[in-house]
Amino acid sequence: LKAYKDTAHLSIHDLWHPKRFVPYLFATLLTGITVIVGLVLLIVPGLVAMTMFMFAPYLVLDKGMSPVDAMKHSMKMTEGHRMSLFVFLLAMIGINILGALLIGVGLLVSVPVSLLATVRAYRLLEAMPKSA
């Protein structure tokens, strides 16, 4: 998140925030379990869950929310934008598959690009005015 906003003042210490690690881990696990259960049920619910909860880990890190609150807020953030975000996720998956096809070395470029693009989408949706 900091790499998107302020690249001039990045340091190796920005990679590790132990206070937020456990909530981040729980948010990631809860989101992952929800997506997997949805995929097992009929695939479409899993894809919807993946799109709805894609920003939950970012909200835990950025706003200090609990994992459940972050998932709820991510649902609200993505409301009205889910189809666009789903196409975005498909594009990111495609870019990473292409990176993997380049003997895996392409992942050194595609993964950071995908992560920064996701943070950009997060920041854009976060900045949008909240509907009542």
Image (cartoon, rainbow, N blue to C red):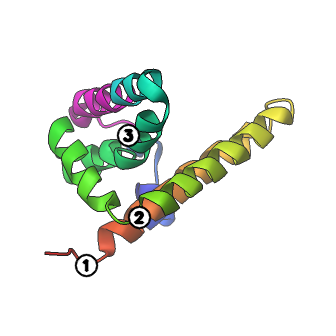
Magenta segment boundaries in residue numbering: 16-32
Image location (x, y in percent) of residue 76: 24, 58
Rendering quarter of residue 9:
bottom left
Dot 1 amino acid type: Pro
Which residue is pictured at 79% across the width and 42% down the height?
A: 98
Helix, strand or loop at mark 3: helix
Q: Is residue 114 above or below residue 130?
A: above
The CA distance from mark 3 to mark 2 is: 13 Å
Q: Quadrant of the N terminus?
A: bottom left
Image location (x, y in percent) of residue 93: 64, 43
Q: Which mark is residue 81?
A: 2
Residue at mark 1: 129
Dot 3 amino acid type: Ala
20 in magenta = yes
The CA distance from mark 2 to mark 1 is: 13 Å
Rendering quarter of residue 67:
top left
Q: Farthest residue in the front direction? A: 42
Instruction: Name the magenta segment's main secondary structure.
Output: helix
Residue at mark 3: 49
Residue 25: tell me if it is visible.
yes
**Crowding near pointer 3: few (<14 within 10 Å), some, many (20+)?**
many
Is disc 3 in contact with disc 2, using a CB cutoff of under 8 Å? Answer: no
**Crowding near pointer 1: few (<14 within 10 Å), some, many (20+)?**
few
Is disc 1 in contact with disc 3, using a CB cutoff of under 8 Å? Answer: no
Which residue is pictured at 35% across the width and 66% down the height?
A: 80
Give the number of the mark in front: 1 or 3: 3
**Crowding near pointer 2: few (<14 within 10 Å), some, many (20+)?**
few
Image location (x, y in percent) of residue 58: 34, 48
Q: Earlier in the sequence, mark 2 or mark 1?
A: 2
